[in-house]
Amino acid sequence: MGARDLTRLLTPRSIAVIGGGTWAGNVIAECRKIGFSGPLYAVHPSRDEVAGVRAVPSVNDLPEAVDAAFVGVNRNATVDVVRDLAARGAGGAVCFASGFLEADAETGDGADLQAALLSAAGDMPILGPNCYGFINYLDGVALWPDQHGGRPVDRGVAILTQSSNIAINLSMQRRGLPLAYLVTLGNQAQTGLSEVAQALLADPRVTALGLHIEGIDDLRGFEALAHAAYDAGKAIVALKVGASEQAQAATISHTASLAGSAAGATALLRRLGIAQVGSLDTMLEALKILHVAGPLPHAGIVSASCSGGEASLMADIGAAAGVTYPPLSEAQQTGLRAALGPHVALANPLDYHTYIWGDEAAMQACFGAMMTADVALGVLVLDLPRADRCAPDDWMPTVRALCAARAAQSRPMAVLTSLPEGLPEEVSQDLLAAGIIPMHGMDPALQAIAAVADMRTPDPQQLLLPPGDLEEGVVLHEAEAKAALVHYGLTVPRRLEVTRDQLAQAAQELGYPLVLKTAGLAHKSEAGGVALNLTTVEAVEQAAQAMGGQAFLLEQMVTGAVAELLIGVTCDAAHGYVLTLAAGGVTTELLQDSTQLLIPAARADVATALDRLRIAPLLYGFRGKPAADLNSILDAVMAVQDYVIAKRPSEIDINPLICAPHMAVAADALIKTGGHDDRSDS
């Protein structure tokens, strides 16, 4: 089924409010308050009016097929009302009632009722159930049963959230951010985040999109959303919260502990060119940057304040956030020296002292000189005093000087406060009108700058999606897993599966040094099932005696390692196949040094991901030591990916991949097949 047309629902010319409770009355009140000018109808079976609007007994008695309806009746009646709306040809509905799928464990019939609701709606779009609805600040529409803090705008950002209470909180922001749409999604029973978001981005008045995500509704739809945003030249910033359920019920390896759902979400957002933030504060600050300037080309900024303490804070907090402060160019220094005189130490971040405080011409020259280099953003650190106790007059020349400097050049500029309350809303709005980004609080503002810097183009390759019938499968232990992966190009040590009485002959055949492993054990090193650097038959036999058992894997020992890596894959139902690269060996959990991508990943992206590891210097030759063979490492990762694409396992763990100057060899491997048995490949 193609995407539904949400135009009538989101930009209605006529509205019906169905129900007679407090919530229904509130919707009518909010429609009037925001200035909705179209026909507004009330539906109630026994009342003559609701909140001052004349009521008709049923949907069938409405004088027209309304564009949008707020359905504020109980859950059982909701199904009947939605069926009637769809039959009348309504444009869509917000379903306010709860007690559907989200309450199935308590009610026992929530899933069935949600299925009935979907059947009743048919092709008519619905938001929810268990949903507050939405506010369209562009056209004066509030299908919204509570108060909110927004006001009409001509253009602005759209925000989608699965939490109605968070939506209310976001509407109350006093940061000057113009909200075009605020939409809640509830259960997403029919119309999900990706579909609604694409409809909002199609509105030319929407400048950027903010997402508060508890779970991805549809991976293919989310990919399509990212590409639609890129094609429209509009950026997305996302706050992903919560843990999604993994496809597998249990894990066999180190990989799954490193590649949880949070790591999968980060990999997904990075792959799709969506800026990820960690708080609502940072999301609002990022949206302001995107609204005014769009994504920043890089994270290099120039900062000025009249305080050395503020300059130091900017330097420390910015470095932690990933913001950089390029050294001042010769042109910047010349311009700043002319504006500030000889007694100010020139640096970035800059403390311009108070020599020029109140001198608008000098301050304009100073702020203009900051912007002569190729910086992504020019920042003035400035906190205004509280207006109820102080007069802000002495601070306004600084604001006017910055506005004049901004008007004289094309690069984006911002006012950034040390504390969130340091910039009143009316000043923030004036700055926005002058094309200057008002930013509230050093921590969220600097994190936002880093988040929207150098946003990548969405990956053109479609994600490898987990099969719908993925099962737990069987575990292929080391010998079987290696045999399966060798078929796809993975290099493994020369090896023999032997019994105790075959050890001596096998040792002579393989040559020394050797590694002896107990067969069929997942975590052998923790259980004393591995013996390394065996150089004689006697040593091999003594190791076997200590391990016990009769079945062993005897391998040539790989020497000359400069680093050990983990290559792992987990099947994450929420995000696809997550490829993990990490510091390997016995220190995997200790170091917690890992990065994730989604399959399929390009070879160049794998190389970039390796650079993100803290142990990356070891791969390139640390303190005079030999470098690892990067091409062999990449070959190993691509071999694992090829296997995953062909076989769709639920989990793979290669730990360690021994990285040496002329090779990369998988010393251990495990596979959980995901419902099929790959032992035939060996």
Image: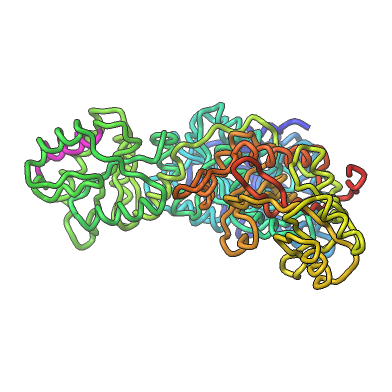
Q: Position of residue 369 (x, y in %)?
A: 19, 34
Q: Position of residue 518 (x, y in %)?
A: 82, 63
Whether 533 is drawn above or below 453: the answer is below
The residue sitting at 39% across, 36% down in the picture is 292
Q: Which residues are magenta?
A: 359-371
**Protein image colouring:** rainbow
Residue 135 visible in the shown view: no
Q: Position of residue 355 (x, y in %)?
A: 8, 48
The residue sitting at 58% across, 59% down in the picture is 592
Whether 486 is drawn above or below 73: the answer is above
Q: Is residue 157 magenta?
A: no
The residue sitting at 22% across, 39% down in the picture is 402
Quadrant holding the N terminus? top right
- Quadrant of residue 477 within the rendered picture: bottom right
- Quadrant of residue 418 within the rendered picture: bottom left
- Quadrant of residue 100 within the rendered picture: bottom right
The residue sitting at 22% across, 58% down in the picture is 309
Q: Is residue 18 left or right of residue 439?
A: right
Q: Nearer the viewer, residue 81 or 133?
A: 133
Q: What secondary structure do most residues of the magenta stretch adopt?
A: helix
